[in-house]
Image (cartoon, rainbow, N blue to C red):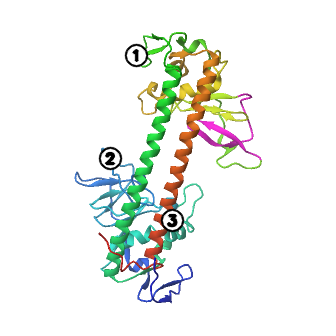
Amino acid sequence: MKRYPKYKDSGVEWIGEVPEQWEVKRLKFLAKNVNEQTNTKKQDEIYIALENVESWTGRISPQDNEITFESQAKCFCSNDILFGKLRPYLAKVARPNKSGVCVGEFLVLRVLDNEVLPEFLEQKLRSQWFIELVNSSTFGAKMPRADWTFISNVKLTYPSPKEQNHIASYLDHKTRLIDTLIEKKQKLVELLQEQRTALISHAVTKGLNPKTKMKDTGIEWLGKVPEHWATASLRWYLRIGSGEFLSNNDFLTEASDQKNIPVIGGNGVMGYTSKTNIQEPTIAIGRVGALCGNVHLVNPPAWITDNALRLSNIKDFLIDYLSLFLGVLDLNRLANQNAQPLITGSMIKSQKVPIPPIPEQKDILQYCSKFSQTIDHGINTLHKQIAVLQEYRTTLISDVVTGKIDVRDEVIP
C-alpha cells in the first residue's frame, strides 16, 4: 500500500515521522478521564467487566444477569472509550454503543471536542505501539496497572476529522473481513476437534471391527459394546487418591534452573517445582472448579497437587488407553452443582465402563494416534493461519492510524 506524499518529524522519538498535515497533541488535550461513580445500574444500562471485552478487537459481550456491586463502578455514555488499565498488554479497549456502568479497572475516556473522533481515537488507543508504550509504564508485579497521569501525557498524531472518519470506516470494513475469516477458521478448528472426539469415542466404546457381534450393556449412555468385552465398575480396576498440597513458596509460575519439574493442578501445568511425588506415568483428574473432570496423563518427574485426583494400582487397562477413554467420558457431568463444582474418587469409581482385551486396547490406541496426528496437523495449520491473520490485523491498524500507509483513496463498499 502507498505512503503519504510528504512527511514531517513529529518531534516524538517513539513516533518518528508523520504525514505533513497531521497534528500532534497529548491525549489529555483530546480526551478527558471521566470518573463518575455509582453502585447501581439502571434497567436499560449495560454492565461491562474486563472479561466482557475481547482483547485487540474491542468486541463487547455485556453481562445480562443481575449485578451485585462489591465496589464502586464507573458510569459511561455511548461512544465513550473504555481502556483497561489492569494488565494493559491485554488491549481491553472498547467503545460501547449505549450507556452503562463498568468496573473501576477501566479508564472512561470522552473526547473533548470535534478535533478527534471517538471511532478514530478508539483505534489509536488499541494500536500495538500505544499498548506497548502504556504497558512499559505499569507498576505492580502480579497485578500491573497503568496510570492516567502517564497515559494522559502520551502524544498522539491525528489527521483532519474528515480523514479520521475515512480511516475509521476503512478499518471497520477491513477488520470485519479479517474477523469473519478468522471466525470461519476457528469454526473449522472446532469441527476437527469434535470429529476427533467422536472418532475416539466410537473406537473406545464400539471397537474397530464393524462386523463384531454386539451385546447390550444396559447402560444408557454406553448402549451396545462388542460381545467379548467385559463391562464393570472402575472400582474393581484401580485406586483413586488425592494429590498432595504444595506451598506457593515451593513452586514458580515460570520454570527456572532449580525449579523445572511441572506442577499439575486440575487444569494441567500450573507451575514448576524442584520436587516430585510420582515415580511412574500417572493419570491425574481435576477434582474442583468449573473444569473439574479434565484428564491428564502425567509422566515423571512431576508433582500432582491436591487440586487433582490421581489413579494408581491400575489393572486390566493400559494406562494410555485408560487416559484416552476417560478423556471422552466427560467426567465433568458428574460434578455437583454447588458454587464450587467438585468430583470425588467415589463418583469416578462408580462408573461402569467397557474393558477390551489388552491386544485390542493396543490396536485402538494405534488407530486413534494415527488419525489424531492427521487431525492435529490440520488444526495446527489452521492455528498458524489464524495467527497470521491476527498479526496482519494488528499491523494494519497500527500502520493506518500512525500514518505509515495512506488509505485516503481506498474505496469502502
Say above or below: 342 vs 161. Answer: above
Q: Is residue 265 magenta?
A: yes
Cα separation, mark 1 vs mark 2, equals: 40 Å
Report how many numbered discs are placed on residues in the image.
Answer: 3
- Relative depth, front residue between 154 and 54: 54
Q: CA distance from mark 2 to mark 3?
A: 26 Å
Dot 1 or dot 2, earlier in sequence? 2
Q: Residue at x 48, y 25 (%)?
A: 202
In the image, what residue type sits under mark 3?
Answer: Ala
Numbered disc in front, either 1 or 2: 1
Q: Quadrant of residue 311?
A: top right
Q: Is residue 39 above or below residue 294?
A: below
Q: Classify mark 2: helix, strand or loop.
A: loop
Image position, residue 371 (x, y; %): 56, 35
Q: Badge 1 local density, few (<14 within 10 Å), some, or many (20+)?
A: few
Which residue is under mark 2? 67
Q: Which mark is residue 220?
A: 1
* Helix, strand or loop under label 1: loop
What's the magenta region? 258-280
